[in-house]
Amino acid sequence: MILGVDVSTYLEELQHGAVYYDGDVVTDPLDDFYKNGVDCMRIRVWNDPFSEKGEPYLAGNCGIDNYIELGRLAKSKGYGLLLDFHYSDFWADPGKQMIPKAWRDFNIEEMVAAVYEFTKKTLITAVNEGVAPKLVQVGNEITNGMLWPVGKLQEGNGARGNYENLCRLIDAGCRACREVVPEAQIILHLERSNDKAVYQEFFGKMKEYNIDYDIIGASYYPYWHGTFDELFENLNGCRVFGKKLMVMELGYGFTTDAYVQGGEAKRLVIDKERAYVPGITEKYPMTPEGQAGFIKEFLAKACENRIDGVFYWEPLWIPGEGICWASEAGQAYIHEEGKSTANEWANQCLFDYKGRKLPGFDEFSVTKR
């Protein structure tokens, strides 16, 4: 089983002075992950994470330049690479799949061509820069489609509509991958990983439209996706499609207490009010020890269920001055103005708010299994 991490914000952390500790000793977390047997780095790529005025969207500012620099660092330490195309200028997830600014007026024909050309150009750049990926994600958490409204799945009676447009877009990305990096494996990534009906519908349509891919990927955050049993029952049901199975994003909190920055307690996505997960938090409270126990059991069950890979999402995204999930310009692009821009995910890391390694770090390991 591949173990990987998505640390797309890591360079931004270092630029803002982040320091990581093992006890009282300064440590290199990438070296430490590699010693644990973690050998693949997932790096997201946004099309153009800057406003028309040149303002950065932050959260790693994950354009191709970030991928190249972080990819070179990762390869120098022995990691393989996973390139995660969002096909957006900023965050893409089940609730938002914003069209890149340069494509905003495109029809379906133009959008298909744009996906193909952008995918091809980006991968050629990666190859030429010595950071060719061994895994490629065509879209990020595309449960409800991508590049909305052109590729958005429409709710209705029975199966959702607009799969023809969506499959044309996905196919364009997959074709470019096969042409430029034929040895790489292609991932289609959804969330809602406890929803068997959605997965059967989605990947059934991928088969119907002859989409050429290798891996079914899922996000698993128990706050939204239920218990281990629900997840693995769903993924095992997807074996009928003949693809590998991976968990592309995994996370669990080590605390529900907010961190304080500038004299103010910062908002968290998962706080005391939203932390309870039936069947999970009774056994694994959101403490450092509870997080470690959660990770240990999850990896054991992933092995039992013959899952091909597990990636922990943003384990190094610790708080710091200037560390944000979005700038105001980024918020404006995704139409989420007015919220706090502070890092809302910091309590899911494998280092605490002061950069000290948590017990869960050691459990995210090949040797521990």
Image: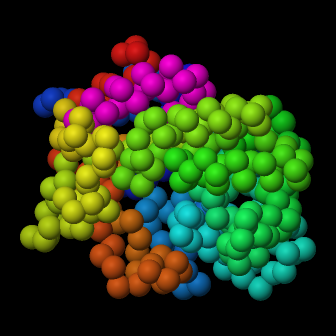
Q: Quadrant where the C terminus lies? A: top left
Q: Quadrant where the N terminus lies? A: top right
Q: Is residue 5 magenta?
A: no
In-front residue for pair 229/151: 229
Q: Residue at x 53, y 70 (%)?
A: 95
Q: Quadrant of residue 98?
A: bottom right
Left or right position of 358 against 155: left
Left or right position of 21 against 160: left
In-front residue for pair 341/13: 341
Can residue 349 be seen in the rendering of this structure?
no
Q: Considering only vertical position in the picture, is 233 above or below 147? A: above
Q: Is residue 294 magenta?
A: yes
Left or right position of 277 against 78: left
Residue 144, position as x, y percentages in the image: 64, 64
In-front residue for pair 161/337: 161
Q: Residue at x 19, y 59 (%)?
A: 272
Residue 43, position as x, y percentages in the image: 55, 47
Predominant SS along the magenta part: helix
Residue 74, position as x, y percentages in the image: 52, 35
Q: Residue at x 58, y 22 (%)?
A: 306
Q: Considering only vertical position in the picture, is 171 above or below 304? A: below
Can residue 22 be seen in the rendering of this structure?
yes
Residue 273, position as x, y percentages in the image: 21, 63
Q: Considering only vertical position in the picture, is 269 above or below 66? A: below
What is the count of numbered marks? Answer: 0
User: Which region shows up in magenta?
Assistant: 290-310
Q: Quadrant of residue 316?
A: top left
Q: Residue at x 23, y 29 (%)?
A: 359
